[in-house]
Image (cartoon, rainbow, N blue to C red):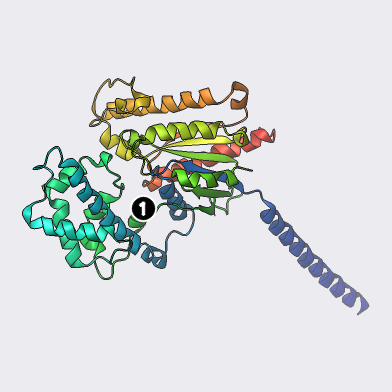
Amino acid sequence: MGCIFSREAAEQGDIRDTIQAREIDKRIAQQSTAEKKVQKLLLLGAGESGKSTIFKQIKVLFQTGFDDSEKKNYTGVVHANAYQSIKILLDGLQEFSESEQEKYTLLPENKAIGEKLTEIGNRTQQPPLTEELAQQIEALWKDPAIQASYLRANELQLPDCASHFLNDIHRLAQPDYVPSKEDVLYARVRTMGIVETEFSPVGETKKRGELYRLFDVGGQRNERRKWIHLFDGVTAVIFCAALSEYDQTLFEDESSNRMIETKELFEWVLKEPTFEKTSFLLFLNKFDLFEQKINKVPLNTCEWFKDYKPLTSGQAEVENAYGYVKTKFEELYNESTPPDQRLDRVFKVYKTTALDENLIKRTFRLVDEVLVRQRLMDAKML
């Protein structure tokens, strides 16, 4: 009997030891996970460069996406974007009609509608879209004068989302309208202050998956003073430059070219002492819009690109012009970075379209591979 009791006691002791061992392993794993270094990424760029859209794509691609309640919260933003877009095009008529009055004059039946929507657009808070208002917006959008104004959108501060929303205005006016994922990505809200999110491009369940904390800060000039507070401990700066904005001016200063502003801003960030060993990932963004524009508006319209000479046309010209812009940014990086400093940090250039989910997913996975490799090299593990 004694032997039986001893054996049972021993077995119970083994079970307790096993449970305790598992509990210890669990706690160690939890502690290890909690202490795992989260890599800090800073998303910088001038206003309208597409930073906020990339930030929203992170939520769609690597987190839970936008649920219905979050999408509904964008309804007012979408409606406001539609009102603002038509108001900007109406304002363009006044400006352009000084030289060509007939071309930029609304049809007689649309003049009263134009006055009404101008007044609504001037309000600090616009009403929800109704079917009646949608019909009036559609009438204006189809008016030849408004279409002529739209063809000169680069001279206006027209948001990129304008055609997306105005072409589908009746859907936006439905009583049960809930913004789609695409609507949320297109919706334009200026980033004020600092927003952040945490994600892993390869999934947190994978052993080698790095965790990143991404910070997005407003790109307009009056928001940049807030940047300095985020400069410490940054693993990499993701700098967004909008390829398509070489012929556009700043929202906050219509005498300044957007591409020149981006060039000067990129140069300033590169020379910031805090980033001496920080990796730089340059996103040449809005390639889709660049592709549509480059054969219509010469690249040398921009002073920085004044020595560019088109060699061909069509898609070949798109790639040729893109290669030229990429080289200009690479030259700027080399001019702004001492040779010895180039050895301590990564510099990569990516062609991006913030609205393209697959492209952004692939880009961030490439970014992850580059940064993981750099960290291993820094730790002399490669």
Left or right of 3 in this view: 143 = left
Counting from the top left corner in percent of width and height, residue 200 is at 54, 50
Residue 264 sits above or below residue 3 on the image: above
* Residue at the outermost front position: 98
Which residue does the image show at 75% across and 64% down from the upper left? 23
Pick the front one: 339 or 6: 339
**Residue depicted at 22% across the width and 32% down the height:** 296
Mark 1 belongs to which amino acid? Arg
Answer above or below: position of 316 versus 78. above
Image quadrant for the N terminus? bottom right
In-image side of 20 versus 317 (left or right): right
Q: Residues within 10 Å of mark 1 (few under 14, many from 20)?
A: many
In this orientation, does residue 48 appear? yes
Q: Residue at x 30, y 56 (%)?
A: 81
Q: Give the residue at the far bottom of this rendering.
A: 1
- Which image quarter is the C terminus in? top right
Query: Which percent across, then down, holds residue 60?
Result: 43, 55
Q: Depth check: give the residue in front, 188 or 3.
A: 188
| Callout 1: SS | loop
Q: Is residue 367 above or below residue 139?
A: above
Relative depth, front residue between 207 and 320: 320
Q: Quadrant of residue 279?
A: top right
Q: Position of residue 155 (x, y in %)?
A: 26, 39
Farthest right residue in view: 2
Q: How many marks?
A: 1
Q: Position of residue 68 (x, y in %)?
A: 39, 66
Q: Is residue 208 visible?
A: no
Query: Pointer 1: what residue?
Result: 188
